[in-house]
Image (spheres, helix red, strand yellow):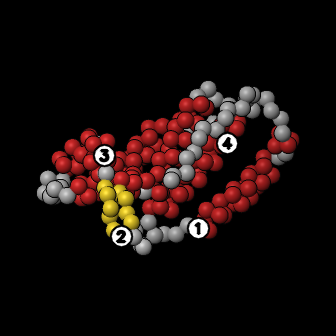
Amino acid sequence: MVNKYSKLPLPKKSAWKKKSWRSFVNWRIRDFIDGVRNIIRWVPVLYKDRDWDDYFITKMLQKKIEHQRKYLVGKNRHVEVGRDNFWMTVVLNLIEAEHQDYYGYEHMDYYKFEGFLSDILIVDNLDEYINKYPGTKRAVLKEYTDRDFSDKMTLAFYMASHRQKKCRNLLFEILKRKSINWWD
């Protein structure tokens, strides 16, 4: 199951009039403290980073959006913070679905396996999966005209791959259109 993010609750008051120790400290000291804090909160992410594939790129993006969403919602200093909270949450959920390959494995929920290593297929409800997404079926049949889809398992696999690709495209389309507004 995919880890689901939910929208952060908006604070009742804005941070505009809020006074903290930051108001009384020189900007150089504040910058230094912010830098140390950033290093500390990014160390676990950087420690686990590898240069193998796109997972680690999107993992860093996910952490950055988590930090920014927490900051923007916590400060509550602009009118559209609720909208930004919503879209950041959607993006975080799409990144998590991408990491888990949620849509790529969704068709596996329609199989029932039995045996010691679950290698004996007992029953498949692939008709239910295929009928659940008729638009995806049409798109796959149109895109892959050179493939033989007489086998339901093959069709379901290509449909799952198509849906996973749509997840990734939606993720970056939302980032392209909405992230320009994510600032304080």
Residue at position x 67%, y 32% in the image: 10
**Amino acid residing under circle 2:** Asp
Work out whether mark 2 precedes mark 4 in sequence or the reverse, and give the earlier one.
4
Mark 2: which secondary structure?
loop
What's the distance in space between the residues labelled 1 and 4, CA to CA?
Answer: 24 Å
Residue 28 visible in the picture: no
Labelled pair 2, 4 in contact (Cβ < 8 Å): no
Q: Which residue is mark 4?
A: 71
- The kind of residue tagged 4 is Tyr
Q: CA distance from mark 1 to mark 3?
A: 39 Å
Quote the CA–CA distance across marks 2 and 4.
48 Å
CB within 8 Å, label 1 to label 3: no
| Image position, residue 49 (x, y; %) | 55, 67
Q: Amino acid at mark 1?
A: Lys
First in sequence: mark 1 vs mark 2: 1
Q: Secondary structure at mark 3?
A: helix
Q: Is residue 101 above or below residue 47?
A: above
Compute the Cα span from label 3 to label 4: 43 Å
Left or right: where does residue 58 sit relative to residue 16?
left
Q: Which residue is mark 2?
A: 119
| Residue at 43% in and 46% down | 171
Quarter the C terminus occupies: top right
Q: Tags 1 and 4 in contact by the CB under 8 Å rule?
A: no
Residue 48, which numbered label? 1
> 76 or 7, which is in the foreground?
7
The spot of residue 80 in percent (x, y) is 58, 28
- Residue 17, percent from left and from top: 79, 29
Label number found at residue 128: 3
Q: Residues within 10 Å of mark 1 (few under 14, many from 20)?
A: few
Which numbered disc, 2 or 4, marks the residue closer to the eye?
2
Q: In the structure shown, which secondary structural element does the residue marked by tag 1 occupy? A: helix
- Give percent across and percent down for residue 136: 27, 44
